[in-house]
Amino acid sequence: MTTNQKKTKKSPSTLPIIAIIAVICALAVYWLGSRPGSMPAKNNSAIASAPAAPSAQNSIAPATAENAQQPKVKSKTLSPDAQSSIEGLEDSGGLLFDPEKQPRAFKTQDFRNLSGIPSGFTVNNLELSEEGLRLPPPNPGEENSPRMGTIESPVDMFEFPSNAVSPIWLEKLPEGTDIFVEVSVSANGTDWGMWHWIEPDEHGTGAISEFFPDGSPNPNYGYIPGSQLAWGLTQWAYVRYRVTLYADAGVEDTPLLSSFRLYYQDSTLGEGHLAEKTEQAEPGSPLSK
């Protein structure tokens, strides 16, 4: 065997994980562009093994698959009672299957026109407005300092063990402002993996179209699609997310977070295994370090 042949030959033990990741990538292309309640929506599938960070000091470590010897957990099967229609920005409320028989669902939190912060959310230096969450005006004497605020979701349990998540969010970003999204997963709701930075893809292959192929409106239109996190055959049971709003020094305007939607799926076709142990989450937002 030549040197080139050795380099291109794949180990049999890696083929199942490679196949699963390939399936996730193919399905993510139409995830966000599909009609709610039928198939997933189209999205750019940047695999979690190499998410790009805005800078070296803001880098978030990538997701990794757990040992293949962990116990297998069969994917939850869909019962007729679990099927439900999806309206607008509401949660899916049940399990859905795409043509490849993979369960998927989503959760949404709308921050517009609220009388108070939703139960379970932790907020730091943010305020509510009719349009959603925003940064408060700078304090006297701090007009030339950067401003930053965060919101962290409560721990939420997936409706079924999942091996991939893909968030989208509705935002407004005046010049000199930005929004940073992070997601963390857990097998037991107590031991958490690291925070993974979600790269936005508003101008790439994940751009969301205004209408479905049949001409009907797409409720995902206007949302910013984020990169997909995928873990091969490793499944997770719990999720949480954190969003940081940021304004440069001297900028009086503020970014706005109006709504956040998290898609999740199980593409392991019954061959997945629930993660037994995770790395501890890194404390703090990357911008606060």
Image: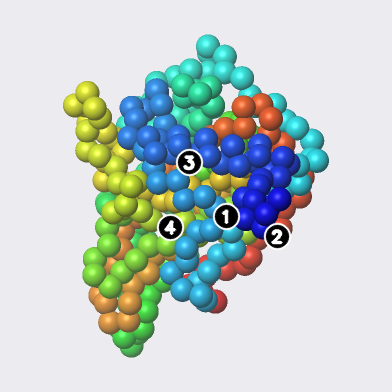
Mark 3 residue element: helix
Q: Nearer the viewer, mark 2 or mark 4?
A: 4
State the image coordinates of residue 73 (x, y, percent, origin top left).
72, 30
Question: Residue drawn 63% across and 59% down?
Answer: 194
* Numbered circle sitting on residue 199: 4
SS class of the residue under badge 1? Answer: loop
Asked whether the beta carbons under mark 3 and mark 4 sit within 8 Å of each other, the answer is no
Disc 1 marks which residue?
49
Distance Cα–Cα, label 2 vs label 3:
27 Å
Q: Nearer the viewer, mark 1 or mark 4?
A: 1
Q: Earlier in the sequence, mark 2 or mark 1?
A: 1
Residue type, label 2: Gln
Comparing 282 with 273, the one in front is 273
Q: Residue at x 31, y 58 (%)?
A: 256
Amino acid beneath label 1: Ser
Q: Is residue 176 left or right of residue 245?
A: left
**In this image, 261 relative to 157: left or right?**
left
Q: Is residue 161 left or right of residue 51?
A: right
Q: Which one is earlier in the sequence, the residue at label 2 or at label 3?
A: 3
In the rendered view, tell whether residue 172 sits above or below residue 14: below
**Which one is in front, 139 or 90?**
90
Residue at 55% over, 65% down? 60
x and y, in percent, of residue 76 in the image: 63, 24
**Label 3: which residue?**
25
Question: Farthest bottom residue?
Answer: 141
Dot 2 corresponds to which residue?
280
